[in-house]
Image (cartoon, rainbow, N blue to C red):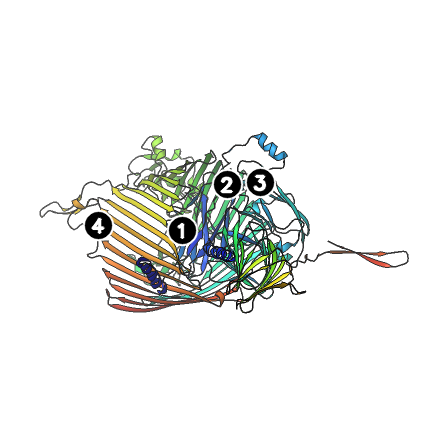
Amino acid sequence: MNRAKFIIIFLLLIFQVTLALAQGKIVHRPPRDVFVNTPVLIEALVEDNTAEIKNIKIFYRIAGKSAFVEDEMHEIMGIFKYNIPAKFVTDEGLEYLIIAEFANGSMAAFPEVDPYNVPMFLQVKSRPLTTTTDSQKTSADLQGGLPNNAIILSPDDGQVVAAEEAVIAVSLFNAQNIALNTIKILLDGVDVTSNAQISEDLITVQPRNLFAGLHTVKITFENQNQIPLNPLIWSFTVVRSITEAERVLNYNANITAEATSEQVRGIRQNIKQVRASLNGNYDWINFDASTYISDQESPYKQPRNRYSATLSTNYLKLGIGDVNPQFSEFGLRGKRVRGINARLMLKYFNLHLIYGETERSITGTISSTPDTLNDGTLQYNRTGYTYTRNLFAVRPYFGSGQNFQFGLYFLKSIDDTLSVDLGMNGIYPQAGQIIKLSGSRPQDNIVVGSDLTIAFDNKRFVWQTEAALSYWNRDITGGALSKAELDTMAPGDTLIDGKISIEGGGSIDLKAIPIDPSSISGIFIINKNIVPILPLNTDTNMVYAILNMPSSAFRTALTLNYFNNYLTFKYQRVGPDFRSFGNPYMRSDIQGFSLGDRIRLFQNKLFITLNFEQYRDNLLKQNKATTTTTSFSAGLALYLGDNLPTINLNTMQYSRKNDINTIDTIWISTVEPISYRLSDNRESNMTIRQDIRIEHKIDILNVKNTVSFNYANSDRSDRLASSRLTGYAFSSMTTSMLGFGLNSTFPFPLKTSFRLSNNHNESGLSTKPYDFVSVSGQAEYSFWRGMLSTIGGYSLTNGKGLVDFTQQNVFLGVQLKFFNIHQLRGYGSFTNLNDRTSSEVFNDFSFFLTYSMAL
Amino acid sequence: MRKLTFISIFLILILLTQTNAQDKIALTLKARGETKLKRATEASFKPNLSVGTPLFSEDHIKTGKDGLAVLVFLDDKSQIKVRENSEMIIRGVKGQDAISKIVAMSFGTLKAEVSPQRKGQFVIATPTSVASVKGTVFWVQSDPINGDVFYGLSGSIEVTNNESGATIVVGANQTGTSTPSGDVNVEKTKENTVPQDTDQETPAPSNILKIQLRNSQGDIKDLKIEY
């Protein structure tokens, strides 16, 4: 053994006996042949996970779409599976990512780096390139097709099989030339292809509700050149069994109860929670119900508990309880609604309808000591209350979206002004005593919009656009105004002259307003608090006015998928007054574009990602400055093969710059002694980030090791530093992180991991840098063939500089599985924190106990 | 020649330990009674192996006192019937036109119905022996203490003892033994010693139509139609 080898093995052995902080890893091999309109089976395993898998979710979308569809993967004997529906498998490509959430709060993702922004991309094959003439096809049909080389695995021809063991299985191991998208499976003449799991080497169908008797299977397929192959036709006989009832009703149920007690710097928080779910199907109907109950639920906060139940068929989906529907970017996008979520899905006409409560009423508090007003009246202040907010949204849409879809939507959300009682704690309005609501005001919001999707050339070209207009009333306390009351609606306008005064001059004749606002109060409450007052700026020409409506939103996106390039162009403008309660966190007052390309090279072994985007705010020049943000990012991912390292490189530049070029002088006194203050509101800064991650698997002495190395740095600097005034404070930040990890799996049931990282930080607002060095390790060992598993670990973090501390943590966890369906988990953690900055020492003990049962 | 065979089998074993656990190599056709499965990436067994479950290289299968599992390999439809109280790991390396298979058996009883293989493509390894199988049907009873018994039903099996390196060929109607001490032996199979298939019976017909017939003399006969 040479010296280098000895050193490597010695280091590995040292690392393996060191306890480490492990993190799960998702093992997934993307499917190779994916064809248009064919379901894609995604399979994944989780390895090296030290904590229980809470759930594994898949997020998928047609490449280039803005929103992912989220769903939970189903575990079947350790493999997590999901069939991405055929409608998402288009020529445009398919994007997906997998997120595993563990019971200890950690997560793992595939792809590992920036999965949401750089998801896995699958090239979807359309029809084979080689064309086949009709005569060729006919000839092959007449001859019964070419040899297929597929093997019937089960049931054998003529076999008698119990219904509960009936699985139709055909091996394609020796039939690699079969075009998977041409496979059609008929069971007793009924097409069951959609129920099949089709992969490159196996077709399986597990038919449900097979009646006793003779059944015939016919499988047809074509090769890559569209030439029909010999069909497989065979028969088998099914007999009943005692488990027939279970065949008809399939269900899964699980319940988990958890008690957590966490102590941080001497402060303890206890949380108890229960989760339960039930899902399954009966014949053609699917059902799904889940609940989450937490002792953190309080009538003084928004709901923490969750309840939901869904029934669905191919044409109708009806959900009640807590749902997170989404149907547009601007209208409704993931906001929790407690109510009804119904969807009618016909081929050409579809309807999506949501009704429910998005916020519940909270009483808040009332001041115990009143203020005495000038007239002697006692005034109590109410704060912290919230009104019940109801939401109704409907979207009829036409077309499947395959080539065309046009939708119209309407959203109405309004606070219930009666949901917060004025009086509380025995204090009520009465003579000489008033109660003032000093918190939020009841509001009203409507959004109308439309969306259009046009796609052609097998969705290599897709254009999507959406436009919406909103109206928002910031305070509906007084209700709607009548037409006559509009006269004096404007602030300071007390003159009844039949005109509405407009801020900045001008007026609108009341006669020009065709409707009485009070007559439409059921749709929207119009009073002086509406935003905007006028939807159009009448001072400019009509085209400019329409393009610059303050409460409008518009976006358009074009995607092109040609020559291994996936190009995207997006433009978006959201006016400063646009507001949707169905998407309350959407940024407004922004306009800009983004341009991106993802290039796939060398049979998807090399991915290059390039993105550029530029946005600006202050669209109506109402603010002092306009800020422009520009970012450019580039990424390179190299997947060389099973025995070679994987390499990820990413870099990003992000800049912010406003249009202020001078330093403001604020005069405090213009007479002697002259006094003024200089204010530098200029902004021009740049953040540059780079990161590299290399991972490689090495097997030594029957020990499987995964070695990872990552380095990341970030630097935020002021580009105007040379011209700043003395004393100007800029929050520059320079960080660098170097990390090393080693996960090892031994031939006996021991897994270890080790992590070492160093983090260096320098902030422009602090006088000295601060550094963190962290080393951690853990080991997991299983007893009794996995019925009992234990995990233990230690971590040490040392901070120096601005923050000066040493933190040590020791933890131990036990997991016991019994009677097949029960599982008990316990975890205890002791942390010693020596905070030298505050001269305090904390000894914190945290633990959790979890019981779960799965049927 | 035997040495060469042993070396080639050894090399295959080495090769098979380098397999990719993501390779789907077999399918579960039957699972009755107490059955368990542990994937290569999992720390523990999961109960109730189900019909239709695909199996990957390095999957660990275990049956309890009433367990039965029938597995079929994807490349050639070779089958393994794992009887009660057995434990084994299946491994496979996908080649261009076949899967090189190894069944690493810890203990228990199995029946292998192996389609014709190229030499060394189907190996059964126990703590005591390594059996290279061509097209054949045979039973194996493996016990780490008492050794292995091979019952040949058709074709032939080449069994190499791990301790002594001694090799025997077990043919149809022959019984081969291989012990931890290195002894091997082949003899004619004795009556009633071969394990019986428990899943061979056709499931009982569940419906019986009974028609009672009476002739002119009053004799009654039942006509039963099972369907």
**Distance between the alpha carbons at the discs numbered 4 and 2:** 53 Å
Q: Amino acid at mark 2?
A: Phe
Secondary element under disc 4, as helix, strand or loop, is loop
Q: Nearer the viewer, mark 4 or mark 2?
A: 2
Q: Position of residue A753 (x, y in %)?
A: 37, 61
- Quadrant in the picture for the N terminus of chain A: bottom left
Q: Amino acid at mark 4?
A: Phe
Asked if labels 3 and 2 touch by Cβ distance under 8 angstroms, the answer is no
Q: Nearer the viewer, mark 4 or mark 1?
A: 1
* Residue indicated by mark 1: A643
Q: Amino acid at mark 1?
A: Asn
* Residue indicated by mark 4: A730
On the question of residue A827 being in view, the answer is: no
Q: In which chain is the residue bearing label 2?
A: A
Q: Is residue A285 left or right of residue A439?
A: right
Q: Is residue A436 left or right of residue A247?
A: left
The quarter of the picture where residue A346 lies is top right
**Distance between the alpha carbons at the discs numbered 3 and 1:** 35 Å
Secondary element under disc 2, as helix, strand or loop, is loop
Asked if labels 1 and 4 touch by Cβ distance under 8 angstroms, the answer is no
